Amino acid sequence: MATIVGTLLTSHVPAIGGAIARGLQDTPYWKPFFDGFRPVHEWLAQVRPDIAIVFYNDHGLNFFLDKMPTFAVGAAAAYHHADEGWGLPTSPPVAGDAALSWHVIEALVAAEFDPVTCQEMLIDHAVTVPLSLFWPGPSWPVKIVPICINTVQFPLPSASRCWKLGRSVGRAVRAWPGAQKVVVIGSGGLSHQLDGERAGFINKPFDLAFMRSLVEQPEWATRFNTRELVAQAGTQGVELLMWLAARAALPAGARQVAANYHIPISNTAAGMMLLAPEPEAEWAV
Ligand code: DHB
Ligand code: FE
């Protein structure tokens, strides 16, 4: 059976991709952010996952406002990155694990989620920036299964629905009759608002409470409805739903291997966590 080895959570601000492309990681603005990833690189070099499930939100590259699925799962052998206008270099295509994708899709439909299935799917900075942060080499040594959650156009799925989605994905992965090691990525957040009167809004106490909750009381954020999440985290800070879905794929007992929080990167509170299941933890059946 496939094994879930941990969850990797990070913000995905496009400017991070620009900093990587220009080699700015050790400059004063970027160093406190990039240094946070060193323990993650060590952990990944030891654990060597084969597959990454990537919970992320598309920002208008693959889906636009005219057709907006609440949940969409990629089922392709390769995913192409395309120019979104941020001035980032385009990454080479990322390999997919289509067989695992279909297994996850079947399990989700059986669990009464009804995702859009995408045999072609363009991926944006919300996939490529986390992959570049976690695996800074010239290529990424994992196949991916991208799972897109709408946080762009209201109505959004509730935090509690995203938790259940992540739990169902976790169950599906653990039932997959392969020997692969799977890491679950949550891409987005933390607090930020790019538009309107509160543009530039950041809520450090809320972000830190949310990060702590993922270790101590992982379902804590499911108490908030969408309006409350927007009020606390900002209109784009609702991307923290990806963290919640990814966290739900682990058992309740998970330990923090690494974490970092840095304000701001661009307009965003940049958070990062690596959580691994406790050896004795009980997985949801
Ligand atoms: C920024 C943050 C995002 O999450 C995003 O998708 C685009 C831009 C920013 O802070 O610049
Ligand atoms: Fe975003």
Image (cartoon, helix red, strand yellow):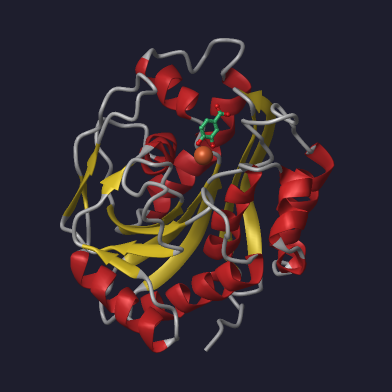
Q: In which quarter of the image is ligand 1?
A: top right
Name the residue rendered at 61%, 10% in the picture: 28
Q: How many labels does the image show?
A: 0
Does 79 sit left or right of 134 as displayed?
Answer: left
Furthest residue toward right: 205
Toward the viewer: 223 or 175? 223
Q: Give coordinates of residue 192: x percent, y percent.
A: 66, 36
Q: Which quadrant does the N terminus fall into?
A: bottom left
Q: Where is residue 244 in the image (x, y as percent from the top left)?
A: 60, 61
Residue 127 falls in image quadrant? top left
> Splitting the image into 4 quarters, where does residue 22 fall?
top left
Residue 232 lies, with reference to residue 69, above or below; the image says above
| Rendered view: 82 above or below 150 | above
Q: In which quarter of the image is residue 124?
A: top left
Q: In this view, does 27 lie to the left or right of 1?
A: right
Q: Where is residue 126 in the image (x, y as percent from the top left)?
A: 43, 41
Task: Give percent across and percent down for residue 148.
Answer: 41, 57
Give the answer, above or below, for where 168 lies relative to 84. below
Residue drawn at (59%, 70%), measured in percent from left and top?
163
